[in-house]
Structures are given as structure tokens and as C-alpha cells.
Image (cartoon, rainbow, N blue to C red):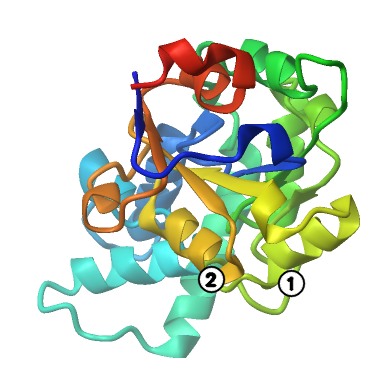
């Protein structure tokens, strides 16, 4: 289902920017396993999957930091030297196991194929902007056949700052020659909605992702319940499917 809070200017949209984790792919299990492998390496107890999933969205280092702080019991800050060691351990494990269970959401590839051009044949630009480190992000997109749809796949270390800072999104807009009114950010969390707001662009929130609860307090312009709904939300010819 598509729920419209603020109608998008569909005929004008030139650039679609997608988050990765929880939007294009379900990576929760591999991220959880990597976090728990890191905790185990340092003699810590593992965390349940839903707890780890709630820590995803602000980059891998923040994911590790939150897991360590949660394991402290009282949420005490983690020493930076220890965080650096744990983060390196996490990355080493995740690089080897990032595709053990990660998969593209059902209907995602078909939706991307339908969205890369307007009904009249004009091309749209599509890119990925994730807070995940760029190399695993690109490797995952290539392995899951997502990469051919995108002009760029940028990660959390592609720019000096991460989402919700708008720097990366603005860089993509510049490269695509698209203005704020011609751009939409598609993601599953408040981080993506805030990134869109900070850049002055439109936003679509995915309730099927890893952080749908965060979209309640930070609502996007449009909510969708599946990748297939992207077509109804973004195709001017599908106006009858939007509620």
C-alpha cells in the first residue's frame, strides 16, 4: 500500500536515491552475526537480533559502539581505543560474511527496472547513498545484481560526514544535474527522512525495513509497504494505486 502525506511532483523527479540496508536489502542477520562475533571475541554476551537491528542506520562504527554500550548494562560510554579494536574486528568478520544471508527484497529488482525511466521514455538517474562502508556496499550491490541500476553507490566513508548530513545527497544531485524539487530519498529510517529534509528533497519511507518504528515520529512524504509499491508511488501513470 502507498500512503501519501505530501504529494510528490512525479513528472519532475529526475533522481531517485536509495538507502541500502532495510531498503534494497535485508542484511540484518549478517550484521547481527558480525556484531555478535565481535562481542564474543572480546568475551561479551551476544545480543538478540531485534536489539542489533535497532542499532543499524548510522554507520558500522556507530553500530559497534551501540552494541558495546548496550553490553555495558548501564550504557556507559566505550573507550575510544577499545571501540577502534572492536570496529576493526567487526569489519574483518563482516567482509567475509556480508553475503551469508543477505538478500535483495522480493520485487526490488523488478521495481528498479520499472523506475529507471518515465512512461514517456525519458531516463531517470538512480543512485545509492548508505552509511555502510562503501566497499562492502558496492560488493553487495554487485553480488545481488543491484549495481547495474545505479549511477553511483556511495557509502558512509565516501564523504567526510554521514547521513543525515546532506553532503552526500547534494553531491549526487550535482552529479545528476537534479535540483531539490527533482529528487527523492528512499529509505527505511528517520536517518533517511532527515537527510531528505536537510537537503530540501522529497522522501519515501519503507515500512518493510529495519527501522519502521522511527518513521512514526519522523514521517516521510510517502510511506510504502513493499518494493513493488515504489512503482505506484513514483510512476505518474499509477496515480490510481496511491491512497
Residue 59 in sight in this render = no
Using residue 4 as the reference point, say whether residue 8 is left or right of it: right
Decide if residue 79 is in sight here: yes
Using the image as rendered, state which of residue 16 and residue 8 is in the foreground: 8
Residue 167 horizontal/vertical position (percent)? 69, 72
Q: Residue at x 31, y 51 (%)?
A: 219
Q: Is residue 234 above or below residue 87?
A: above
- Report x, y in % for residue 134: 72, 54
Tell us which disc is closer to us: 2 or 1. Answer: 2
Q: Secondary structure at mark 2?
A: helix
Residue at the limit of the structure toward the left, as seen here: 74
Task: From the viewer's perspective, tell me whether residue 99 is left or right of residue 179.
Answer: left
Residue 25 to residue 192: above or below: above
The alpha-carbon separation of the residues under discs 2 and 1 comes to: 16 Å
Asked whether 127 or 180 is in front, the reply is 180
Mark 2 or mark 1: whose residue is earlier in sequence: 1
**Could you say where residue 238 lies in the image, as x and y percent from the top left?**
54, 13
Front position in the image: 243 or 61? 243
| Helix, strand or loop at mark 1 | loop
Give the quarter of the image for residue 65: bottom left
Q: Quadrant of the C terminus?
A: top left
Going 64% across and 77% down the picture, which residue do you hit?
161
Please, is residue 147 above or below residue 121 in the view?
below
Residue 95 spot, x, y in % from top left: 65, 46
Q: Quadrant of the N terminus?
A: top left
Which residue is label 1 attached to?
159
Residue positioned 82% across, 46% down in the render: 152
Q: Which residue is mark 2?
A: 198
Amino acid at each position: 500500500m502507498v500512503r501519501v502525506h505530501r504529494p510528490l511532483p512525479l513528472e519532475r523527479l529526475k533522481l531517485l536515491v536509495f538507502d541500502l540496508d532495510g531498503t534494497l536489502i535485508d542484511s540484518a542477520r549478517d550484521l547481527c552475526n558480525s556484531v555478535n562475533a565481535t562481542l564474543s571475541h572480546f568475551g561479551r554476551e551476544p545480543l538478540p537480533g531485534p536489539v542489533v537491528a535497532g542499532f543499524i542506520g548510522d554507520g558500522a562504527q556507530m553500530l559497534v559502539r551501540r552494541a558495546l554500550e548496550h553490553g555495558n548494562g548501564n550504557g556507559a560510554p566505550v573507550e575510544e581505543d577499545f571501540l577502534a579494536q572492536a570496529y576493526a574486528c567487526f569489519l574483518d568478520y563482516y567482509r567475509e560474511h556480508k553475503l551469508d544471508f543477505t538478500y535483495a527484497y522480493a520485487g526490488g529488482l523488478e521495481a528498479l527496472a520499472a523506475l529507471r525511466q518515465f512512461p514517456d521514455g525519458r531516463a531517470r538517474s538512480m543512485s545509492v547513498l548508505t552509511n555502510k562502508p562503501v566497499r562492502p556496499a558496492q560488493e553487495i550491490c554487485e553480488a545481488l545484481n543491484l549495481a547495474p541500476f545505479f549511477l553511483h553507490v556511495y557509502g558512509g566513508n565516501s564523504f567526510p560526514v554521514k547521513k543525515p548530513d546532506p553532503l552526500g545527497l547534494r553531491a549526487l544531485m550535482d552529479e545528476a544535474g537534479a535540483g531539490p524539487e527533482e529528487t527523492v530519498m528512499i529509505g527505511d529510517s528517520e536517518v533517511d527522512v532527515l537527510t531528505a529534509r536537510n537537503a530540501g528533497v522529497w522522501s519515501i519511507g519503507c515500512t518493510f525495513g529495519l527501522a519502521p518504528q522511527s518513521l512514526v515520529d519522523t514521517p516521510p512524504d510517502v510511506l510504502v509497504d513493499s518494493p513493488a509499491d515504489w512503482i505506484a508511488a513514483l510512476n505518474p501513470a499509477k496515480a490510481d494505486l496511491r491512497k
